[in-house]
Image (tube, rainbow, N blue to C red):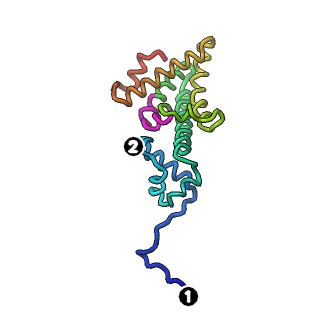
Amino acid sequence: MKRKAAPKPAERRESYHHGDLRRVLLDAAHAEIAAHGAQSLSLSSLARQAGVAQSAPYRHFADREELLAAVATEGFEAFTRAILQAAEAGDEAGALKRMAAAYLRFGEENVELYRLMFASRLVPGSGPDSPLQAAAWASFQPLLERVAAAEPQRSNTAANVRWAQLHGLVMLKADGFLDAPAEDLLAVTAI
């Protein structure tokens, strides 16, 4: 049997094996979303960026929606860490204001990720036991706990109103309707 000659260097197909392709795809998706928003993201473009076959991402994500849900889940986890760090950065009396500032800062620094997390149908469309639902709920808990301590009779309603105020400020700034610094906005917001 005759052996086939090795391909010449120019004929070799470039391939790359990732030790953790799931992580590489998530990192690439985060970067793509930050630069261009989630609407233009595709698994095939991420595969090209990662230097893998177009079918490779499907070993880790069933479809684009599952990838976006994973990105949003990580976004909620990072958001929760940011507001918890802010809450713990001083006395309890100022925790709610610091959390509100961290909320606005996260939204300003991660506009497109924030849109994916809070202005898409991903969370409402996810299952009640999904990692995305758990991460989204966990991000609301610190606010709810602080508000419940101050207003136990109306904690859910009061927390939702504060959340709506913060969300509105983030979205109005993101869409160019407000240009005031976050500190100025918080100074006149009933948080």
| Mark 2 or 1, nearer chain start | 1
Q: Position of residue 108 (x, y in %)?
A: 41, 32
Few, some or many residues within 10 Å of mark 2 (<14, 14–19, 20+): few
User: Extreme right residue here?
Assistant: 129
Q: Main secondary structure of the magenta part?
A: helix
The residues colored magenta run 104-117
Q: Position of residue 95 (x, y in %)?
A: 54, 23
Q: Judging from the image, what secondary structure is the residue with disc 2 in?
A: helix
Residue at 59% across, 22% down: 144
Q: Position of residue 158 (x, y in %)?
A: 55, 15
Residue type, mark 2 in image:
His
Write down the residue under mark 2: 36
Write down the residue under mark 1: 2
Between residue 156 and residue 97, name the one nearer to us. 156
Residue type, mark 1 in image:
Lys
Drawn side of residue 7 relative to residue 62, left or right: left
